[in-house]
Amino acid sequence: MTNPFSVAWTTPYGAPPFDLIRTEHFKPAYAEALAQHGAEIAAIAGNAAAPSFDNTIVALERAGAALRRIEMVFGQLTSAATSDDLQAVEREIVLLVARHWNAIYLDAALFARIDSLYGQRERLGLEPEALRVLERYHLDFVRAGARLSQAERARFGEIVERLAALGTQFGQNVLADEQETVFALSETEMTGVPDFARASAAETARERKLNAPFAVTPSRSSVEPILHFADDRAVREKIWRAFVQRGAYGNKNDNSKIIQEIVALRAEQAGLLGYPSFAAFKLADSMAGTPEAARGLLEQVWAGGRSRAEADRLALQALARAEGQQEPLEAWDWRFFAEKLRLA
């Protein structure tokens, strides 16, 4: 069978032919796309002509079309329609892709071309948009370790690969909790839930082959209608707790140790680039610029935001009591009574 990624798509608007794409297509398609992109990058870096905006920056923009196409599809499927087999492929592919981009960002010859253009950027006569693209490329390479020593580059590359693997495992653990945790609900427990959500919950019960008319999982799309509309407060609490504890149950999917390692690696990554913290590294490339500026903005809005939230809480608490609930307003009550207040 022909690999759909090796041929042109004749679908309306060039949409991915999802009906033809199989899990086994991704590894060979990625191998081909990565090799093609690598060859394009090597040609740019090894160009004997003096660096110009067209033969370096524009060429970089045009490179990797096949890789972008496969990543668009792969990202959609792994986040919305995954499986054990696809997740196994994802764990393998994420390392290949991380190494691929490490090799690009740490390519001394390629960065030398970009750096040369950046140094003479004011004399190139570029339009403002083109100048911004050049500046963006230069900054991205610097932040990806292009100016580090050889030893530092090696360690930086190791960190990037490990963070890619950890990030993938983190997401897969959350998805696993969503898939492995399911709550069978009765007709009574679904009182108040609108027809569209009842139909979805009924389909979930059928898919999981449960002896119950309805079922929900801790995924957001399954949880939100329950929290907004279910009259049964105990059901709302049970579903809310499962939702906020995804990846934190203390089971095989628990992300606690992964988080600790991610935090440590991010701090080391920032240190290699000369930043005092990962927050400083992350915000240097943002409107805020520094953690102090970001905190200053938060402190400006904190008092007013907290006051508004407190007013909302009092209004919702009053509505809850009018509805007969004497217990204090909890997180699993908020959406439910906010919806009632909105309708009122």
Image (cartoon, rainbow, N blue to C red):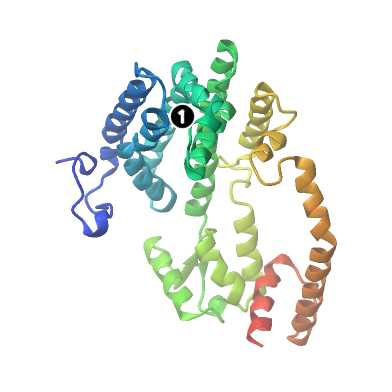
- The answer to whether residue 262 is visible is yes
Q: Secondary structure at mark 1?
A: helix
- Where residue 297 appears, x then y in whole percent? 78, 52
Quarter of the image where one finds residue 331: bottom right
> Mark 1 highlights which residue?
98
Indicate whether 127 appears above or below 39. Answer: below
Residue in the image at 45% along x and 76% along y: 196
Q: Is residue 59 positioned above or below 225 on the image?
A: above
Position of the C terminus, as image quadrant, is bottom right
Residue situated in front as seen by the camera: 119 or 32: 119
- Tag 1: residue type? Ala
Near-viewer residue (45 or 54) = 54
Dot 1: few (<14), some (14–19), or many (≥20) neighbours within 10 Å?
some
Residue 38: x and y in percent read: 34, 25
Count of numbered tags: 1
- Whether residue 344 sits left or right of residue 94 in the image: it is right
Q: Which residue is painted at 75% across and 78% down in the image?
A: 316
- Residue at 36%, 32% (x, y): give it: 59
- Height in image: 311 above or below 95? below
Q: In this orientation, does residue 325 appear?
A: no
